[in-house]
Image: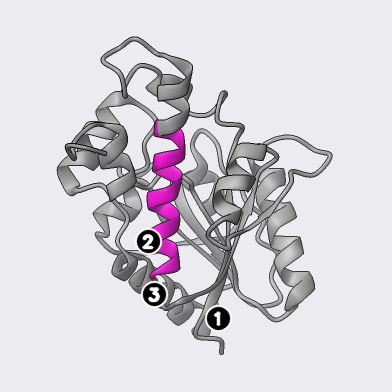
Amino acid sequence: MTSTVDLVVPVKPLAKAKSRLRGAADGGIGEPRAHARLAMALLRDTIDAVRAAPAVRRLLVVSSDPVVAAELGVFGIDVAPDGPVPGLNPAYERGAALLREQDPAAAVGALQADLPALRPDELDEAVGAALALFAAGARRAFVADADGTGTTFLLAAPGTALDPRFGVGSAGAHERSGALRIAGSWPGLRRDVDTAADLREAAALGVGEHTSCALALIPGC
């Protein structure tokens, strides 16, 4: 059984991403550049945690935003454009297919792009818990968000389709599709950020340097 996994992180165009957070980075003004900077900061902190997690072998970002591709490319992060079918789940499916082209026997996972309080050890532990379930015969497993209704992380065993069901009520949708809910606290992994209240909760947990700079939590950024 594999001990590492390959992950897909999809990213909307920055101008359209995180619409409910507009104004969170500039006192409610909602200036487009400040909003795009915040959206990119959430992504960068998520990716930094992923890249520091030993359990993750490969990371693929799926995005057609040229700014995302350019900024991440500087750091050697692979970025593939969206496919012909729009939407979050098709982006996950495209990324999983591309990763499986490189290694058909890979365990492939889907991770949300807005986890600025994620810690590498949390991700490692969640991967380990999922792999233990696979060793016992499970084929897919997921981590629910802080509210328990959404999903932040989904993993498929080698030879199993990812079959993502992200969206409203995705935790229930993933369970109904046969995926097992992974038990564990992992507050940073569970705290995705869609609203200003979510962002405050993430900041209380401790966000990464990019989000801290975007929110002016670090002087001189």
Residue pointed to by mark 2: 49
Residue pointed to by mark 3: 129
Three-letter amino acid code at disc 3?
Answer: Ala
Residue 147 visible here: no
Which image quadrant for residue 185? bottom left
Which image quadrant for residue 64? top right
Q: Residues within 10 Å of mark 1 (few under 14, many from 20)?
A: few
Magenta stretch, residue numbers: 38-52
| Residue shown at 37% from the left, 47% from the top | 115
Q: Comparing marks 1 and 3, which lies closer to the viewer?
A: 3
Residue pointed to by mark 1: 137
**Left or right of 149 in this view: 5:** right
Three-letter amino acid code at disc 1?
Answer: Gly
* SS at mark 3 in the image: helix
Q: Does 162 appear above or below 83?
A: below
Q: Does 147 appear above or below 188?
A: above
Q: Residue 23 in the image: state x and y as whole percent.
A: 35, 16
**Left or right of 204 in this view: 7:** right
Front residue of this view, candidates 30 and 100: 30
For the C terminus, the image quarter is top left
**Left or right of 76 in this view: 183:** left
Q: Residue furthest right?
A: 84
Circles 1 and 2, Cβ within 8 Å, touching? The answer is: no
For the N terminus, the image quarter is bottom right
Q: Residue 119 in the image: state x and y as whole percent.
A: 29, 61
